[in-house]
Amino acid sequence: MRRRKLILVILLLLPLVAHSDSSVQGPLKILAEADKLALLYNWPKAAPRYAEAETLFAQSRDGKNALAARLGYIWSTADAGVSRAVNHEVASYLDNPLVQSDSSLKLRALVAKAVLDRNSNEIAARGPWHQILELATKLDDERWEGRAKAEIGQILYMDGDVQSATTMLRDAIVSQYVRFDLGAAINYTAMVGNGFVEAGRPETGLQYCNTALKAAFFIGDLGFPYLAYQGKARALIALNRNAEAQEVLDEALWRARADGNYMALSQLLVVAGTAAVSHDRNKAIRHLVEATNVSQGKGFQHVFAWSSFALAKVYRDTGNIDGADLLASRATASMRDLEDKYHLPEHLALTADLAARTGHFERAEELYSEAADVIDGLLVNVNQRQLKGSLIATLSEAYLGHFELVTNKFSSAAKAYQVIEQARGRSLADTLRGESESLAAGDKTSLNAQREINRIQLALLRETNRDARQLLLDELFRVEQFLSPARRNITLLDSATDRLKPVPLKTLQGSLESNEMLLEYVIGETKSYCLRITRTDASVVVLRSGQKRIEELVDDYRSAVESRQPDSKSAGDLFSLLLDPVIGQQQQTKPARFAYR
């Protein structure tokens, strides 16, 4: 029903946005037509009109409008590449007294700068978008006010302020539909769809992207909706609908090449390369190599880090460890520079895995520890289940790699225990506090805490010294208590020294009776582990089955229990897999007691 209403609204608005067939004469009309096309993201048609208008204005010695057309041209060609020369050019315009004294020209210059900055690194565009919002509000320009809010909302999401980001994006998109800024409405609807896919909700992401694509069908002169195609392909891949995803990607890739839209091309190539990994690694490598070359050559730093990471994983899995290590190191360094808090941990984990494969075990352990610390810091102000779930999934991969490293290479049950307990610490804190509380509630204390947390998190992602990171995590815990009224009312945890930390192994062993044993399980893809702790001993037992087999047996056993049916087969298999290797040979003088985690 909602979709039908949306399509009906769009049909009613068609006369307002359809392309005019009347002849366009004079540079002012050409400039107005270029602006109209640019607002619809139709860069292939907007760019030549801006260039034509600039030439005509220059011939008539109209410097102000020539500059307006030039800034429009830079905006409409930003997806073709970001260069140092163009960045310097826009910076010089912003210092130009003519631009500073003319609010409309200044808005155009800020838009050009914001789009260039965004294509290089979204977070770097924070300042320009805030300036655009302030200036558009002053000028009562509702279109750019809404677009600026949407862009700032995306940046807030990357900062971890999910509640504020959601509110700002929702309000901006509603405003865009109401005010007929349909190009922006479709673009940011697709952006939200991509966000849902990234957060592990592909079904919802697919719905948003399909809504954007259905709306796009009815808008005359709308540019090709690359972001909606990208989000749809990513969602279909996550849902294992690979044939459909390939059709979407083929169409979008062909169009990106035809339009010379290298930003869209490089992003789509990463998605296509990732999709091909499971069935055609040579094809995956071709796509990812092209994506890496295009993004690096065109100045798209964030896409370069993304494509390098994906290519490094394929190289690792095909045995090209040296190539993988080089790419992973470069991508990790880029992520630090880009201040991408949410993707840095998976880059660190990959770099750690490669270090371990090349025999640099101490370096690998340090990198795994850093990944865990960064994620622990990020989980502080995230209470959205989907976003937190994606971070915990990354943490699971990192901590499994770390656990296997200290178990297999260092043969240290004590270090294995520390790895497990650090991974459990944040979930325990959330359980004690409750998931229902509202973070960043909007009062002044909460907002100040959010800003301070963001500052500490940025410092955490740049800090490579383990002791220094622990100090930052202690500071983060202190500030965390001010995030919401519920946390401030908890007086038991009111200092940095109260941050939940693992109980030392010796202390835990001292609390066990002679007939007690604590078992902690770590489930891997092909094999699993059990950390076996008694009063006098701690060891790691390797189990012969991985995640898939264990989950199948657990599901079978649970179904039997729920249906009240006897199922000795799955129960016996589970005992043989999980318990017998650990306790089968245990000598007991009195009945044993076990605790499992």
Image (tube, rainbow, N blue to C red):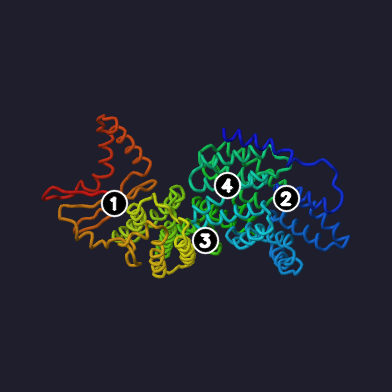
- Number of labels in the image equals 4
- For the residues bearing labels 1 and 4, Cβ distance under 8 angstroms: no
* In the displayed structure image, the side of residue 557 where residue 5 appears, left or right: right
- Nearer the camera: disc 1 or disc 2: 2
Q: CA distance from mark 1 to mark 2?
A: 58 Å
Callout 1 secondary element: strand
Bin the neighbour count of mark 1 within 10 Å (Cα to Cα): few under 14, some 14-19, many 20 and up: some
User: Mark 4: few, some, or many residues within 10 Å (few <14, many ≥20)?
Assistant: many
Residue type pointed to by label 1: Glu
Q: Nearer the viewer, residue 373 or 433?
A: 433
Residue at far left of view: 589
Read off the residue under disc 2. Answer: 38
Q: Which residue is mark 4?
A: 271
- Badge 3 marks a residue whose secondary structure is helix
Is residue 519 toward the left or the right of residue 359 in the image? left
Q: Are marks 2 and 3 in contact (CB under 8 Å)?
A: no
Q: Are marks 4 and 3 in contact (CB under 8 Å)?
A: no
Snapshot quadrant of residue 232: top right
Kind of residue at disc 3: Thr
Quadrant (top left, top right, bottom left, bottom right) of the N terminus: top right
Marks 4, 2: nearer the viewer: 2
First in sequence: mark 4 vs mark 3:
4
The local secondary structure at tag 4 comes to: helix
The residue indicated by pointer 3 is 332
Q: Position of residue 32 (x, y in %)?
A: 78, 51
Residue 520 circle label? 1
Q: Which residue is pictured at 25% across the width and 53% down the height?
A: 532
Distance from disc 4 to disc 2, alpha carbons, whole Å, reads 26 Å
Residue 283 visible in rendering:
no
In screen coordinates, is 468 left or right of 203?
left
**Disc 1 to disc 3, C-alpha distance:** 32 Å
